[in-house]
Amino acid sequence: MVVSTLNAVFKRELVLAFRQKSELLQPVMFFILVISLFPLGVGPGPETLQKIGPGVIWVAALLSALFGLERIFRDDFADGTLEQQMLSGIPLSLVVLLKVAAHWLVSILPLIVVSPLLSLFLNLTSAMYTALLATLLLGTPLLSLLGAIGVALTVGVRKGSVLLSLMLLPFFVPLLIFATAAVEAAALQLPYNGQLALLGALFLLALALSPVATAYALKVSQN
Amino acid sequence: MRSCPGLCYYSAQFFPNYQVHKLALLDANNLTCCKSDRVLFQQLSLSLDVGDILHLQGPNGAGKTSLLRILVGLSQPQSGCVNYQHTSIEQSNDFAQQLIYIGHKPALNPALTAIENLTYWAQMHGVSLLSDIWQILSDLGLAGLEDIPVSQLSAGQQRRVALARLWIKPAKLWVLDEPFTALDVNAIDMVQQKMQRHAQQGGAVILTSHQPVDMMHNIKVLIMEYQWL
Amino acid sequence: MWKWLHPYAKTERLYQLSSTLLPWFSIAALLLLISGCVWGLMFAPADYQQGDAARIMYIHVPSAILSMSTYAAMAIAALIGIVWQIRTADMAVAAIAPTGAMVTFVALFTGAAWGKPMWGTWWVWDARLTSELILLFMYLGVIALYNAFEDKQQAGRAAGILALVGVINLPIIHYSVEWWNTLHQGASITKLSKPSIDPAMLWPLLINLLGFACLIASLSLAALKNEIIRREKHRPWVQQLVSDI
């Protein structure tokens, strides 16, 4: 029974995302726009762009992900679906995990899909892009998992979106450091397995702790 | 039961000795609820038997909704406990199975249709008989509105969709927060009859309502007073 | 009877405890800081490389060390509040956070002021300074979250969760920043690079460290007293207290 229920949760998230396409496109547009602004701001020199490229893409990805993050629980909290979910007897942390997965699929994966275009904009070499892609694939789920805790904490607060960034951005520092370090290592043709392994370890840690913390935070928000 | 002067008093219909009921479906002992560091109510005990309909009354802000949310386990009381069939609701295995809670918020996603919302809810709560959802909705006067987004329904129609849950899930205990808001006379009558039948068939209902609920024979009333401490 | 008095009695008792402890910590902080600062700033020998500028160390090092410990103290209070559902522990989180933010700010400010004569600029992305900066943001996040809620009971619980998530992240952030720093700057500038410190300099430093700890404790206790009064102002005991004054 639990499996079919969780299946229903996942399906519903996808249906909702499909119905609210425009809301989902906005973070992607933002992502592309911010990155297009950088050559205008720092000058079009290919070497400069290549040097700052990985960092710029990662910072832009962090910010655009933060924009879409509230979607995870905002609507469900506002219309009372969350209450019903808590009373259904299904462990809340499992539901949270699925919602985070669905959210990653519909609002973060598009960012990764457009990233080849942006790496062209910023003149990344193909080795750098491979590393960037690997860090994005490993790092953004971590971002969603950590973000879910923040959203769960601020879901009951009016105008919580600035607060959300204030709370979450410090936690993303290690992610940013390891991810850009991997791309820089790739640029110098050095191995970057170590950085990827660190990202993977952080991801596993978040995977273990975040659903529990998020479920608890949601319960506090309901109180 | 401790008397709480000026805080909550019970009408004569409401029996005070809550502890000794074999049939007690739900009982709450010495609940204290604090909101914003103030005591909303304290030392509140109640017991609900099979066949009971309990009507919570009181002015706005008296803590009716807070009490209901504590009774279903959505919020935690400052002290005291709630038991379902003599087991704490947190440990009880079938409490979730036997409960329908309908709160102020209708739990309907405005972008989804009535059918989608209810199907999702039914799956969530482990109810499998989905074939008669269409019949239930048309009985509730929603024929033809099943597959348009809920956001396009009127407040009363949305409330009907929310209340359709009472027909979908077989559960013993119903906890309804202001179920009659925005409903027309017809629909109120339908829901009241449904509650009556439910009580007669071995269920129990707790509801809050500012409308008089007059037709039910075995109704009990708990009056809560507004008091910030 | 006792059970329903429990929540009241607790805050009241904590208030009394804080009132008893506060003067002791304040006096200790005052004495220690005066003696430590006078000793350190006037009598201790100047650093042979950095001259008198290094004397800012007597403020910077204790505040930098204690900014992290204060976060740990806040997280312990948060853990107590969450595990045992104790409301006063959540109040302590709210009281410690602004104190911690202030100490972190002092560490950052003195670090920048020390950087000017040493490195020639006010700000260098040195690993320790960067860690302190992020720590300050984490304190501000806890404070902002606490203030965002109208129901302070909920606010305390939420801030507690954030503090706990933060304390798990703190070592990760700290080491990642250190690693990032060595990656980008080679051998980075470390401030206490000498393996041992002259005892004549160590003593005033230790006295100031203790003095700062007492100062943080007394500021947190004062904030806790305010927090209790603010949140319990409708309770009879607070009204009794006010009428007694």
Image: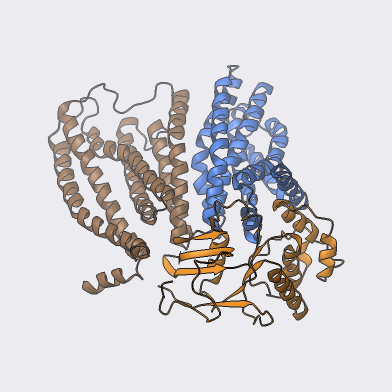
Above-or-below relation of B118 to A120: below
Q: How is the image coloured?
A: by chain
Task: Find residue B223 and report its horizontal and vertical position in percent.
Answer: 53, 78
Query: Chain B: what color?
Result: orange
Task: Find residue B35 and report its horizontal and vertical position in percent.
Answer: 46, 65
- Asked whether B121 or B93 is in front, the reply is B93
Quick one: which residue is furthest to the left in this view?
C43
Q: Is residue A162 in view from this perspective? A: no
- Left or right: residue B116 versus residue A214 is right
Which residue is found at the position 17% from the left and 51% from the top? C24
Above-or-below relation of A184 to C227: above
- Asked whether C174 or B119 is in front, the reply is B119
Asked which quadrant contains residue C4, the reply is bottom left
Quick one: which residue is furthest to the right in this view?
B144
- Left or right: residue B43 versus residue A161 is left
Q: Is residue B15 in view from this perspective? A: yes
Asked which quadrant contains residue C209, the reply is top left
Above-or-below relation of C220 to A130: below
Which residue is found at the position 62% from the left and 57% from the top? A83
Which residue is found at the position 43% from the left and 49% from the top? C82
Task: Find residue B90 and report its horizontal and vertical position in percent.
Answer: 54, 53
- Asked whether B187 or C196 is in front, the reply is B187
Q: How many marks?
A: 0
- Left or right: residue C104 versus residue C209 is right
Which residue is found at the position 73% from the left and 62% from the top? B165
- Asked whether A222 or B125 is in front, the reply is B125
Query: Chain A: what color?
Result: blue
Task: Find residue C79 and report its horizontal and vertical position in percent.
Answer: 41, 45
Query: Chain C: what color?
Result: brown
Q: Quadrant of the N terminus of chain A?
A: top right
